[in-house]
Image (cartoon, rainbow, N blue to C red):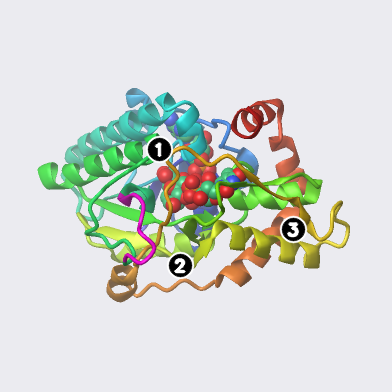
Amino acid sequence: MKKNILVTGGAGFIGSNFVNYWAENHPQDNIIVLDALTYAGNLDNLAYLQDKPNFSFIHGDICHRTLVDNILEKENITTIAHFAAESHVDRSILNPNAFIQTNVIGTFTLLESFRHHWQVQNQPPEYRFLHVSTDEVYGSLEMEAPAFTETTPYAPNSPYSASKAGSDHLARAYYHTYNLPTIITNCSNNYGAYHFPEKLIPLMCINILLGKPLPIYGDGQNIRDWLYVKDHCTALDAVLHKGKTGETYNVGGNNEVKNLDLVKLICQIMDEIEPNLPIKPSSQLITFVKDRAGHDRRYAINSSKLQKELNWQPSATLETGLRETLQWYVNNRQWWQPLLSENYQNYYQQVYEE
Ligand code: NAD
Ligand code: DAU
């Protein structure tokens, strides 16, 4: 059945990858992106779709109830894929306000508006509210502990993850209380094209291209579980088409790596694929800096429920996904150079130099 799908945060990293994926794989559906274009939102991420008749972009805030009500009604929205969020842990440490506003109040506003819309339409069974969340809500794992499952208790440790946990609880409560067809996904660290330069992988890649230091927090032994963003998109597709309402699905690529090892691998690949680096070998640029406050030691995600029940498998290995991603940054300087703006430099100075 044809969907009219509202993608919130569709100009951000994962949202834009999802929109590009969806337009290619489900050309019959209408895609409406709602995005406030914060520092992390970028219309260039959607450049290939601008002229497509079944794509439209609305510049606006998910906290604006009247705006959201009007979009749901006018566009006859059947599905919400909710990505819009403040997403960077370091920024949540500097200034948590925006995280509470967008992640908690924004999600609440969308849920309320969608509940009203779904009820006015007589509760169509095919409607869906997909709430895209993170593994960070589960907190930090001990080294030998088993990976997070869907029943791991929530223990968020940063203002970012606490705000995402709050939004997950709201999405869950709307299913239990009102029967609203919500589904939650909790995903591990993504990487790929269109990733804003402040996050670990693009930051290291861009700094290597510029011959700048590669700042590793603390001892570099923290572990993250990396997933190629294209595999996240296929997982969300499976969840939207086959997932059960009221359920949570963990999404991950089974790629646990220590930060220092990951950065060394990035250096090695960059040395191979870019002959004209300012400093070679680029691993000379590795620099240990002050640790992130409350830095979670380890994340690892068990996605066997998604694999068994919805028949999903990631297709990229860390090596193949990373090579594709780093090559994309090498080829697309015109995409990332303008993002290293004065605002970005101020942020960089606050986190790394003050
Ligand atoms: P991002 O920061 O790259 O993009 C967020 C997008 O949301 C931006 O386009 C921004 O303009 C928009 N936005 C922010 N506030 C808004 C508001 N009030 N109204 C409308 N739009 C607003 O984030 P991302 O990395 O693409 O993450 C997308 C979602 O996936 C988030 O919910 C995040 O918690 C979740 N997630 C991210 C990762 C990851 O590794 N990046 C992993 C798991 C889950
Ligand atoms: O786990 C999912 C989460 O992954 C998402 O919910 C978040 O939206 C996303 O930003 C990401 O959070 P992290 O904090 O894990 O990602 P980040 O890229 O900021 O950092 C990854 C690891 O690298 C983390 O242990 C901190 C470390 N790091 C990061 C930066 C930016 C450094 O050592 N140096 C750095 O300069």
* Residue 139 image position (x, y, % from top left): 34, 49
| Image coords of residue 86 (percent x, y) | 45, 36
Residue 302 lies, in percent from the top left, at 34, 67
Relative to residue 13, is residue 65 depicted above or below? above
The residue type indicated by label 3 comes to Ser
Mark 2: C-beta under 8 Å from nearest atom of ligand 1:
no
Q: Nearer the viewer, residue 129 or 250?
A: 250
Of 297 and 199, the residue lying toward us: 297
Q: Which residue is drawn at the image coordinates 26% and 48% (left, top)?
A: 154
Tag 2 near tag 1, CB within 8 Å: no
Q: Residue 173 appears in which quarter of the rendering? A: top left
Q: Is residue 334 magenta?
A: no
Residue at image location 28% in from the left, 46% down from the top: 155
The label number, if any, that marks residue 47 in the structure image: none
126 w.r.t. 353: above or below: below
Q: Nearer the viewer, mark 3 or mark 2?
A: 3
The magenta stretch is 138-145
Instruction: Say left or right for 215 vs 18.
Output: right
